[in-house]
Image (cartoon, rainbow, N blue to C red):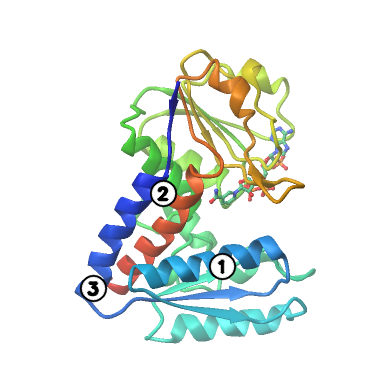
Amino acid sequence: MKTLSGKELAAAIRAQTEAEAAAGPQPRLAVVVATDDEASLWYVRSIAKAAAGVGIACDLVDLGPRAEPERIAETLAKLSADANVHGVMLQTPLPAGASAQQLAAGIDPRKDVDGANPLSLGRLAAGLPAFAPATAAAVMALLDHYEVDLAGRRAVVVGRSTVVGKPLAHLLLDRHATVTVCHSRTRDLASVTSTAEVLVAAVGRPALIGAGHVAPGAVVIDVGTNPTDDGGLVGDVDFDAVAEVAGALTPVPGGVGPVTTALLLRHTARAANLP
Ligand code: NAP
């Protein structure tokens, strides 16, 4: 079984991004935060740190956990109109009553570096240029990096969220995979996932995918990030059990996560250089 680490790929993307960022005006990413969720705050701080490392300016716009949806909407509109800001991202979770999808519709699609505006998803579905959500793009980048053939292969995505599962299904379809999407109402999940040559788990449930869900030799990508009681992180895939069956498997942490952050920055550098 081959472990598909994301670390080297992330480093390569960061190096390329640093060169792209240095070639034009300094790219600037604005991350709007309205939560006191520790894991989210840790994530946005890690984005800011990674941005600094590649020469991208990153503003954390913290509106506080009680921000009204109107204030968030105004902030996104202002940042979208600001010529000095090239990428705009809205971090979730949001305060009760605020809809991420409705608010993300206010991000200029040309600055929508995490593919959160429904227009971006629509353009992806139509096969038109758009920023894909960084996580979905990271799964594709990992498959490409490890030269996993997709054309004509059976791909199963577990999870149908608008941030991961749905955009990923479109990206896989675009690459001519035969795609099945599973979700919480899927009956007999293992009978579907065990048909996959490429299996992606994007659910948010530790060890949902066990050895019985995986075909021998399958390539398994674990998007899940589930915090453990001891402060660690586990994926949706039971790594040790699935490693006995799969041909290749991403670790958590160290798989999809680092590539996601690197691609968010690449998207920002590209947004800064859009004609
Ligand atoms: P989400 O919005 O909660 O969606 C979860 C999906 O899983 C839903 O489609 C849900 O089905 C499905 N599901 C739930 N229970 C299931 C079950 N027992 N069997 C089959 N499907 C089931 O989550 P998300 O935002 O897509 O995130 C998914 C995971 O990826 C989380 O662990 C998240 O932390 C992680 N993530 C990682 C990164 C990264 O960079 N590595 C980035 C983003 C997210 P229904 O639609 O029927 O409810």
Which secondary structure, mark 3? helix
Which secondary structure, mark 1? helix
Residue 223 visible, this orientation: yes
Whichever of callouts 2 and 3 sits on the residue coming sooner in the sequence is 3
As drawn, 16 above or below 257: below
Rendering quarter of residue 248: top left
For the N terminus, the quadrant is top left
Name the amino acid type tagged 2: Ala
Name the amino acid type tagged 1: Val
Give residue 266's position: percent from left, percent from top.
Answer: 35, 61
| Mark 1 burial class by Cα count in 10 Å: few <14, some 14-19, many 20+ | some
Whichever of callouts 1 and 3 sits on the residue coming sooner in the sequence is 3
Q: Which residue is mark 2?
A: 126
176 sits to left or right of 247: left
Which residue of the protein is positioned furthest toward the left in this rendering?
Answer: 23
Name the amino acid type tagged 3: Ala
Which residue of the protein is positioned furthest toward the front in this rendering?
Answer: 230
80 sits to left or right of 231: left
Whichever of callouts 1 and 2 sits on the residue coming sooner in the sequence is 1
Determine the CA span between mark 1 and mark 3.
23 Å
Q: Quadrant of ligand 1?
A: top right
Determine the CA span between mark 2 and mark 3.
33 Å
Q: What residue is rendered at 31% in x and 31% in y?
A: 147
Q: Which mark is residue 44?
A: 1
| Mark 3 burial class by Cα count in 10 Å: few <14, some 14-19, many 20+ | some
Mark 1 vs 3: CB contact within 8 A: no
Rendering quarter of residue 149: top left
Q: Which mark is residue 22?
A: 3
Mark 2 vs 3: CB contact within 8 A: no
